[in-house]
Amino acid sequence: MTDITSDLVRDLAAYGRGRMISARADDVRDDVLDHAFDELGFDGDEESLWAQVREAMTAETTVSRILQEQATKSSSPRERVKTPPPWDAVKDGHLVTAPFRFVPVNDSVSVLKKRPCSHDHPAEGRLSAVIEVDWQVETPLLIGETRETPDGTQTVEPFRLGDTWAVPGATIRGAMRSVVEVAASGRLSQLNRHARFALRDFEHPRYKAFVERTTGTPGLQAGWLTMVDGTPHITPCGWGFVRIADLVGSDDPNVTSKWAHKERDAKYAERQITWQGAAAFAQSNAKPFSDAGEHQGRRLFQPGDSNRKGHLIVSGAVPGKGIVNKKYEYVFFDAGADPVPISDTAWNVFETSNCKPSQNARKPDGSWAEFHGTYTAGGRVPVFFVGNLAENATDREFSFGLTRLYRIPHARSIGDVLAESAPAHKVSNDGTVPDPDFVDALFGYVFEPKDSIAGQPANAQVAERSDPADLARKGRVTFEFAFPEGPGDFHLWPEQPITTIMGPPKASFAPFYLAGVEKDYSTASKVALAGRKRYLVRHRPGTDGDPGKPLLSALRDQNADVSGETKTHLRFLVPQGDARFRGRIRLHNASKAELGAILWALTLGADPEARHLIGRGKPFGAGQVRVASLKLHTRRNTAWDADRSANPVHWKAEQGAGPLQDLFDAFGQEIAALTGSPSATWHKSPAIQALLEAARPRGWRDPGTTYLPYMSEGKQAKAFADLRKKTGIGVSRNPDARRPPGRLLQT
């Protein structure tokens, strides 16, 4: 535990008095403790710390009065944390703003009653088709690739195929599949079921329980993570604390803080320690450490003459500048123990907590990005762990990480939440692969063996006892590149790249991405995924004028005073005259219902207002397109030589459904039959209505449709934290009018 020194109390009291000026009184305690833990490295008892800081703050008359008023409103700060303040639609409603909404998850799935049509020969009763599509671009479009400008800036510019602007078929395919999944009651499959988001919130009940487990016996333990025969193992070892003052030879806070602000690599270089690669922390490179006694429960060691040799383990740089309260690094002592294999479950939890979200090729993030190369090279990586290492395969609370207070996973993965709340979308858990649905059969699919048991690691036996045709199937619809067409042309805009930042809430932000009273991935109460995310269409052609101006303003409003690494430089394509993109879509061995599904998705059911969004900048209104016209060529497999579709179907947006209605009806009847819903009302389902509502332009300034405006001094992060508290674990169950709706972001 970190000491509560007079310097620490004084610094935090000054910080708290400053926060009194710009924050509400009842938020000051949280601000002070967040600052202590996150910025100053404090890890001791927060109640003792707050009691001393509050006493120091009351030396100021004005602050004393405010704190006394706060005390009369709440009997103790802890009570307020345990029972979050109730949701207030007037005071808190401004926090619920985002450029996307969620389409409700369908209750039933259009699972096929027989095996999908094959590719090897023309099937009786089926047809082949070619759809020529003219895409009208209504707002600046960017489907980009990164190029380096003459001044060395990495700028994302529109994609070219040779010297010609192009829209990749994969972009159109993705947009159409997402629409068909909704309209056809498809399985929610385009998600990472195994992701368990990481948690390091000292106020969260789950993390508090973790911190308690780090104390006592055996408490927090240490070891070396290594790869043995291609699999992860941990070799337990002894460990202790090393005072930074003993490393730098001075108790001067300026000197110790200078060390704390150094990057990990610089610290190891200064001590001449090999910490990366196959030779990392080799036993032969251990150095002597002598026992320095015990202080406040910490076993201390210091470099010096001793027969006991160990390895200095340092942390990364403390962010910011100036004096910080970090006082310790660590030493690991080899204990001659044998390496213990880590279970697939424990390893999956570690990776998902330390990698950027991805189902397959996970990309190491944070400290793991620094150590991953060492691990794959066969070197030793220092880790801390909690729980029974020998029984880590069955100890659900076993976890390990790269720092002493590491991030732990939430109790539920995305797959867990989906399986509990929407069983129709659950991937089979009986050791078999699921039956494909209408969407899978048309677009193709690959069922990963690891997905056969939702939320669990790979089950390789599934592949061994399954027909290969059940595990994967090629799609019967292909999308070609679309190229400029028409009398007009496209040009780059603006002349100088737009500099902006992209930092919206991600799926880990439970208040938006979960539905239920307690919106938290570790709640014991019922919770569900909010649905399929759809960005809102903004520009109203003929009403809103030049879309470039509001788009430029929206992008620049995001340009906060942050480091250049987080900024993105963009240029878009803007049409001149009647410039359009034209591309072709081909279907093979398709049914009338499948052809109807593609046509319904392209035209959004021939809704005259609805539009698609593709490419970058969708949250800000970029990439708005519609199908202005199309030409449909079909030929029946049973009349392959006789029917050459001499009379193709021509369709324009102004016609409504027109000649496509028959195919729309075939699509609707098929989905109704597969899901057991009335064929006359399939298109009126809540999911389809929400999809169309999000696709209809609503203007550039519709309230609640932008990201929370950037606020300086950490206020934006504080606003998101407030939203988590007021919708998370322990939220009071007030009358419906006073608690958040099941889904905060609804169309």
Image (cartoon, rainbow, N blue to C red):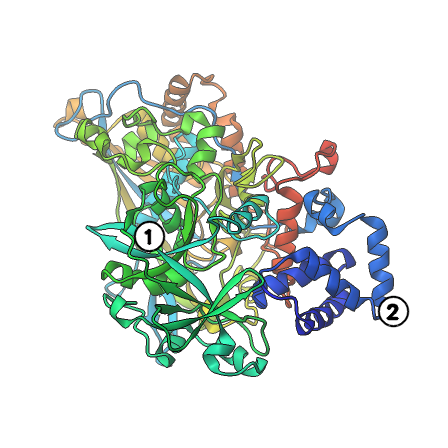
Q: Residue at x 43, y 38 (%)?
A: 396
Tags 2 and 1 in contact by the CB under 8 Å rule? no
For the C terminus, give its image quadrant. Answer: top right
* Displayed quadrant of residue 468: top left
**Whole-percent x, y for residue 110 in the image:** 38, 24
**Closer to us: 364 or 617:** 364
Considering only order in the chain, which callout, 1 or 2, is on the residue closer to the N terminus?
2
Question: Which secondary structure lies at badge 1?
Answer: loop
Question: Which secondary structure lies at badge 2?
Answer: helix
Counting labels gives 2
* Displayed quadrant of residue 297: bottom right
The answer to whether residue 35 shows anywhere in this view is yes
**Closer to us: 87 or 646:** 87
**Whole-percent x, y for residue 430 in the image:** 31, 24
Q: Which residue is mark 2?
A: 61
In the rendered view, would you say 399 is above or below 416?
A: below
**Closer to us: 197 or 294:** 294
Q: Which residue is mark 1?
A: 362
**Whole-percent x, y for residue 318 in the image:** 51, 71
Distance CA(mark 2)–CA(mark 1)? 54 Å
**Whole-percent x, y for residue 386 in the image:** 44, 48
In the rendered view, would you say 214 is above or below 394?
A: below
- In the image, is 246 to the left or to the right of 639? right
Q: Residue at x 70, y 34 (%)?
A: 733
In the rendered view, would you say 416 is above or below 149?
A: above
Given the image, on which type of amino acid does mark 1 rest?
Answer: Arg
Given the image, on which type of amino acid does mark 2 rest?
Answer: Thr
* Displayed quadrant of residue 359: top left
* Number of residues whose C-alpha sits closer than 10 Å to that of mark 2, classed few (under 14), some (14–19) or many (20 or more): few
- Residue 159, numbered circle: none
